[in-house]
Image (spheres, helix red, strand yellow):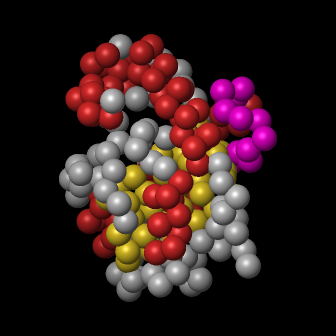
Amino acid sequence: MIRPTLVIMLKEPRPGRVKTRLGREIGMTAAAWWFRHQTARLIRRLEDPRWRLVLAVAPDRAGLASRVWPAHLPRVAQGQGDLGARMARLLRGVGQGPICIIGGDIPGIRAAHVARAFAALGAHDAVFGPAPDGGYWLIGLKRSGGIPARFLGDVRWSTEHALQDSCATLPDARIAYVDTLRDVDTAADLAQAR
């Protein structure tokens, strides 16, 4: 049996290059510091023998060489394009078997959430972990068939339509939804996460 793959999408935590919406409210250095420590905790919590953990890093060259993340974990470059193009490329090309992708800015994720998402792929083609703002914290595919050519195209990212638009790019898929979790984009989100 092929072990599933969990991909965490990460940006190198440099002030002004990561969590800029949050940084406009609390300062770019503070936002980068929060993201660095948040992702370190997240990675420790999600290393699990039930799946292979891969870090998808940006910027490509600096992220692959960065000393910020654990050296023992495999890394792949996110590559160019909008969020949808980068996620679609990862979902098509990283590992075999079921795959889920998450971001590094969701403090509430635990291994049990990821396990539920992989379990849902047993009877479904795709899985999403909704966020309260209309987006999502997790996307996953069983990958037993082909991925549609326009998968994750025409998605209105960073809007309340992101989840709905993403599901629409999988017109014939059996889609499951798991736990709703909040990401951190603003100071108000950060206060709720604490």
Find residue 6 and report its horizontal and vertical position in percent.
Answer: 60, 57
* Residue 27 appears in the picture as rendered: yes
Residue plotted at (54% across, 26% down): 36
**Left or right of residue 177: residue 95:** right
Out of 125 and 37, give the one closest to the viewer: 37
The boundaries of the magenta stretch are: 66-76
Q: Quadrant of the N terminus?
A: bottom right
* Residue 80 appears in the picture as rendered: no
Q: Magenta segment: does it hold 73?
A: yes
Q: Magenta segment: does it hold 71?
A: yes
Prevailing secondary structure class for the magenta stretch in the rendered image? loop
Q: Is residue 96 above or below residue 101?
A: below
Find residue 166 and report its horizontal and vertical position in percent.
Answer: 34, 65
Find residue 69 and report its horizontal and vertical position in percent.
Answer: 67, 33
Q: Residue 28's quadrant in the figure? A: top left
Extreme residue in the front direction: 112
**Left or right of residue 176: residue 58:** right
Find residue 7 and report its horizontal and vertical position in percent.
Answer: 59, 53
Residue plotted at (33% across, 50% down): 181
**Left or right of residue 65: residue 131:** left
Q: Is residue 169 above or below residue 72?
A: below
Q: Is residue 69 above or below residue 25?
A: below
Residue plotted at (57% across, 44% down): 45
Number of dots carrying numbers: 0
Extreme residue in the right direction: 72
Q: Quadrant of the C terminus?
A: top left
